Structures are given as structure tokens and as C-alpha cells.
Image: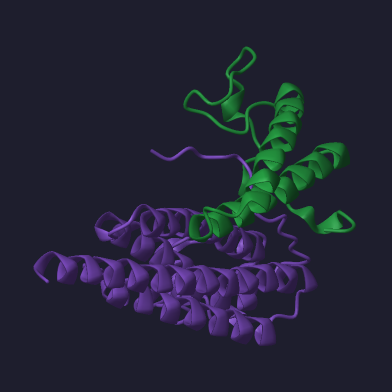
Amino acid sequence: MWIYEKKLEFPSRICSTNPKLAKVIITQYGGPDGELAASLRYLTQRYTMPTGRSKAVLNDIGTEELAHMEIVATMVYNLIKDASLEEIKAAGLDGYYADHDKALYFVNGDGVPWVAQYIQSKGDPVADLHENLAAEQKARATYEYLLQLSDDPGISETLAFLRQREVIHFQRFGETLEHIYEFYNHQHRFFMGDHS
Amino acid sequence: MSTVRMQMLIDIMALEFTAVELNLFLDTHPGERRALDAYNATVVQLDELKREYEARFGPLTNFGYSDSDYPWRWVEEPWPWQINFAHMKGV
């Protein structure tokens, strides 16, 4: 069960209409290293995590990523909602407009729709956690590229917040990986003890 | 949306972010007493602030987590993506 809260995780400021910026930021909505991929990856991997701790980490970070998806959507929505058709065309968003008007859809910066192949759920906690560590680094790098592209101080503030969360999530996944190794080592010693 | 309401929302966001951060830390450090005490203290503060906000501006959560005045206030705008904090200082 999830409970919706009628607020964002971060007070997002948008200084002006900017469909060009929306076009690149949307990749963190529906792109390969975006927030949809992150949340669905962790929330689907959590079922086969072996310990209470690892289940909690995947559950909670997956849930926080849903909140990040909402922040990204809020930025894109507000950057394009007041854009004129001329501005939409100048930003190269006319193809997107033909399919979606100014609605939110899960695509990357070039309009490629989201696919489940962006994520994996391997059933092997070590493999899954390594994927998640990589995912957090890829998302961090994406936010850094977006920060280079952003000319809106409010948007940059929000992107910097989201970038920082990737760093924290990476840290927590690293601790979880160590915990998983300890868990298996412990099991191993127990197993050996049984047969000695 | 009034400045007072926005400021209350920002205060709630700040406290809830503290809770999120401590929550994730506790997931990987469940034996850290100081972090747990800080988390529990944040819960009390956050609960107080949310009650005050909801009494004035309507429910922040639904599905049985908050009650509502008549008529059902959950449907009131603005929704989160309709709020722009651009003119708030210190955000």
C-alpha cells in the first residue's frame, strides 16, 4: 500500500517558460537512467532481497524515487505549459507536441519511449545491488550534464538536490551490499559448522 | 497560494526530508541510537506541523490518514505540480 502526500519532496522553483530545457530534463522522467526506471527497478527487485534490511532499503529508495519522478514531471510540466507553438517548434518539441500536446509522457530527450529493458531484476542480490550502484552513478552523471545545460537558477537548484540524492542512495546501496556479503559469509560459516 | 501557506509547506518539506534521510540511514544502521532518537523527535515535530497545516488548508494525505471538513477537501487545487515556489526567498 502506498499513501499519496499532496506535496513535493522539494520546493521546486521554475523561473521562466523554457521548452528547450524541458526537452532535455524529460530524460530523467522516461529515459534510461531516469526516475521511472530507478523506482520500478528497486520496487521490483525488493521481493527477492534476502534480509529485512535489504528489503527496507529497496522499498524506501524505490518509494523516494517515485517522489523524484514527480519533481521531474513538475519541472517539465511548468517549463512547457505556457510555451507558444513558436517556442515549441524552436525547441524541437514539435514532434513530441504532435503525439502528446503538453502532456507528460515517458521518453528520453530524443523522444524514445521508456522500455523495461532499461532495468534488470536478477534474483541475485549481489548482482541486483551492483546494478543499483551503477544506476545511481549514471543518474548522478545525467544530472551533472543537465546542470551544464540549465540556464534557469530555480531548475538548477532542483537538479542539484536530485543529484545529491543519487549520491546518498549510492552510499546506502553500498552499505547494503556489504551487509549482504556479511549475511552470506555468516550463512557459509554456519553451513560449514554443520558438517564439520 | 498565500506566502504563509507556502512557507508552512516548505517547513513541512524540510522536516519530512530530515525524516526521509534518517529513515534511509537507519535502514542500513538499525542499531544507531542517536539517529533513531533524532528520527523519533522529527516524527513528533512533523506530526504537529502537518496537523496545523491540514486544519487550515485541507488534507495532505488521503485513504484514511487525514480527515476532512465538509465538503471533501481532498479535491481542492492546487496539486503539488501547480505550485511554483519561484518567488519564495530562502528556498
Q: Position of residue A36 (x, y in %)?
A: 42, 64
Chain in green colour: B
Residue shown at the point (51%, 39%) measured from the top left: A4
Furthest toward the right, the residue is B89
Residue shown at the point (67%, 60%) measured from the top left: A82
Residue A106 seen by the camera:
no
Furthest toward the left, the residue is A195
Q: What is the quadrant of the N terminus of chain B in the image?
A: top right
Q: What is the quadrant of the C terminus of chain B in the image?
A: bottom right
Q: Position of residue A33 (x, y in %)?
A: 44, 77
Q: Quadrant of residue A133?
A: bottom left
Q: Nearer the viewer, residue A46 or A64?
A: A46
As displayed, is residue B45 above or below residue A107?
above
Left or right: where A184 falls relative to A82: left
Residue shown at the point (38%, 60%) measured from the top left: A54
Left or right: where A54 falls relative to A186: right
Residue shown at the point (65%, 40%) measured from the top left: B40
Q: Position of residue B63 (x, y in %)?
A: 47, 27
Q: How many marks?
A: 0
Q: Nearer the viewer, residue A33 or A149?
A: A33
Furthest toward the top, the residue is B70
As displayed, is residue A42 above or below residue A94?
above
Q: Position of residue B78 (x, y in %)?
A: 66, 39
Q: How is the image coloured?
A: by chain
Colour displayed for chain A in the image of the structure: purple
As displayed, is residue A13 above or below residue A159?
above
